[in-house]
Image (cartoon, rainbow, N blue to C red):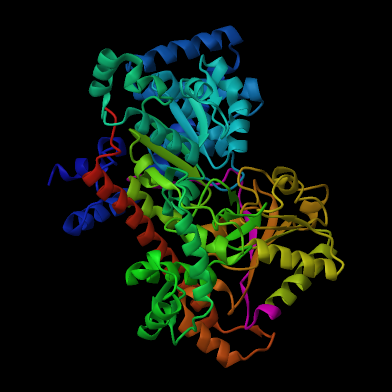
Amino acid sequence: MSRLPTTIWRTVAERPRDQELPRGLDAAWDAAIGIAARLKPRLGRFLRRAARVAALEKEFLDLSSANLREAAVALRDRFRCGREEPADLERAFAVIREVAAREMGLRPFLVQIAGAFALEAGCVAEMATGEGKTLTATLPATIAGWRGRGCHVITVNDYLATRDAEWMSPIYRFCGLTAASIEQKMPPPDRRQAYQADITYCTNKEVTADFLRDRLSLGRLRGLPSALMARIVDGAGSGTDRLVQRDLAYAIVDEADSVLIDEAVTPLIISAEGPNPEQVQAFQAAISIATELEETRDYTLNHRYREVDLTDAGKSRIEELAADLGGVWRGARRREELVIQALTAVAFYVRDRQYIVDEGKVVIVDEFTGRLMPDREWRDGLHQAVSAKEGLVVQAPKDTYARLSFQRFFRLYRKLSGMTGTAAEGWREFWQIYHMPVVTLPTNRPCIRVNRRDRSFATESGKWKCIVEEIGRIHGQGRPVLAGTRSVGASELLSRLLNEAGLENQVLNAVRHREEAQVVAAAGQPGRITVATNMAGRGTDIKLGAGVAERGGLHVIATERHESGRVDRQLFGRCARQGDPGSCQAIVSLEDELVHRHSPHLAGSLRRRYGKTDREVTSGLVRRVFDMAQRRAERQALEQRKGVLQSDNWLDQYMGFAGREA
């Protein structure tokens, strides 16, 4: 029993993350350790160490730039040789803090220093929106750069990767380090050079894709010894000359909940064109057959899981309709799979919600971020089925060369940490998948956000009417309003309703995304009305215009509850930043997708009870329905992400593709 505390409190880095998820009693024990790790009083320790760093300010404040640089070089040498003591980390943070103040005019606050200690310890640091996560990351990133094995700072898009690398580079240069960023269209030689920098800013998609391409270049080679031997024997023909990345030593993931949880449900795939005219014709025929089928008689729909089940009558009807087609339609299993995909495309994939049509092609919209994903396609023929539904030119499915989930990739890093404004709700998953504890940091200034109770309506029409009236009321006070929607279609609908009411507004969605930073940055001006999907604001501050704070600050309206409570909290975090005033409220209806999909029976019963009126519903039961639906959605999403990771483990076991580098 005396050894138990050591087992529980061991550092995250000591336990490999790239092994299979535990099962049975092992899973129960691992969960118990996670609960114990959550109860460990880390925050107090990080704040005390941050206070000691702040106390060192006087020592470095009066140093000349040359002497400060000498102090940084001396610390770099200690970290490079692995001779640092615990006190050296505090001293190093104090030096970097002084460098940031001189080079950037930004001196990290106490909570930012504590956040840096959390990142250095391999935790997920929950820091409220607007608390300065970009600056916080420079402290542990500099330490990683001094250790000489590199550091990847993962952001959510190319714009932020380039911006942050350029913005923070003066700190790194002063400390004797190099910083670079990876962009989508960057050629391999430039990528290789960027990865050789001490600190590399990049997106999760780019860094994972580069890892996959490197593995394809290596072929059957696994690990450093075999790669070195092949280099000696085969020279340039070994494939090692085409590699762009180096060791996966340390990653700091910004917006960790989005990157490590929300986007982890879809694996990243390297593929190439695979022409197949017969397959293309089959997708078009499947849509024609699907339109001839009748729900209930021929098939049933499961809205919660987006599944289609054919009835016996439906199978017979498909066989009858496909009798003259021949080819793949002769096999019962294959023709039923094709029609099920077609029915899935028709029933569950809605234009301007899950996708848009741009230049004659179906482009996926990320349901969590609201951003376009032009380089992604749905698998197993679903993308082709949606294209056929829209009457577009259908491209043949691509041949898959390699695939890897984001969970599996990030578990390959020797050290991993993250930061986000919304992590507390996902603490179990952060521990279970990545073995990272969550540390919730206080705000630098007290948060004075006014969280108003949700308003619920029986119908969507009643909800939209209330939203327009509420926006008009707040606008009349001279306050700015940000209305968040779940889809492109909903944002366009709300914008049209506001225009009809004589309320000028700005729209930000996957279609109108080119001026995202400018639109979001101006959303705090007096009387400004901004309608946006989930893409609004991650990485861009909303600063209040003149006189707005005195009127109550920015007001945020959620027009639907999302399938994850974290996304709701992220939207509400757009207001009341850094001690500013602000308020937020959700206005929802019993016809919203969340309850329709994840609590259909109870929501349907309540809709019948309250009828088709536009009146507001004040029952506490309605609020519980939304809470229950959200919990169900979160559990389902977690199981899907686990399924993706388990699929990766299966492929690794039987096909031997991805693995930890030696």
Q: Specify whether residue 443 is painted magenta.
A: yes
Q: Considering depth in this image, is 343 or 450 the residue closer to the camera?
A: 343
Determine the residue positioned at 24% across, 48% down. 20
Q: How many marks?
A: 0
The quarter of the picture where the C terminus appears is: top left
Residue 585 image position (x, y, % from top left): 65, 66
Q: Considering depth in this image, is 224 or 301 the residue closer to the camera?
A: 301
Q: For the magenta stretch, what is the residue range?
A: 435-462
In the displayed structure, 343 sits above or below 251; it is below
The picture quadrant where one finds residue 271 is: top left
Q: Specify whether residue 597 is painted magenta.
A: no
In the displayed structure, 413 sits above or below 97; it is below
The reply, left or right, for residue 145 in relation to residue 1 is right
Q: Residue furthest right?
A: 502
The reply, left or right, for residue 661 in relation to residue 506 is left
Residue 161 image position (x, y, % from top left): 57, 34
In the displayed structure, 307 sits above or below 370; it is below
Q: Considering depth in this image, is 66 or 340 the residue closer to the camera?
A: 340
In the displayed structure, 60 sits above or below 452; it is above
Determine if residue 306 is in view.
Answer: no
Residue 458 image position (x, y, % from top left): 62, 83
Determine the residue positioned at 80% across, 47% down. 545
Q: Considering depth in this image, is 478 or 650 the residue closer to the camera?
A: 650
Determine the residue positioned at 37% across, 46% down. 407
Determine the residue positioned at 22% across, 46% down. 654
The reply, left or right, for residue 142 in relation to residue 519 is left
Residue 1 image position (x, y, % from top left): 12, 47
Determine if residue 4 is in view.
Answer: yes
Q: Residue furthest left?
A: 1
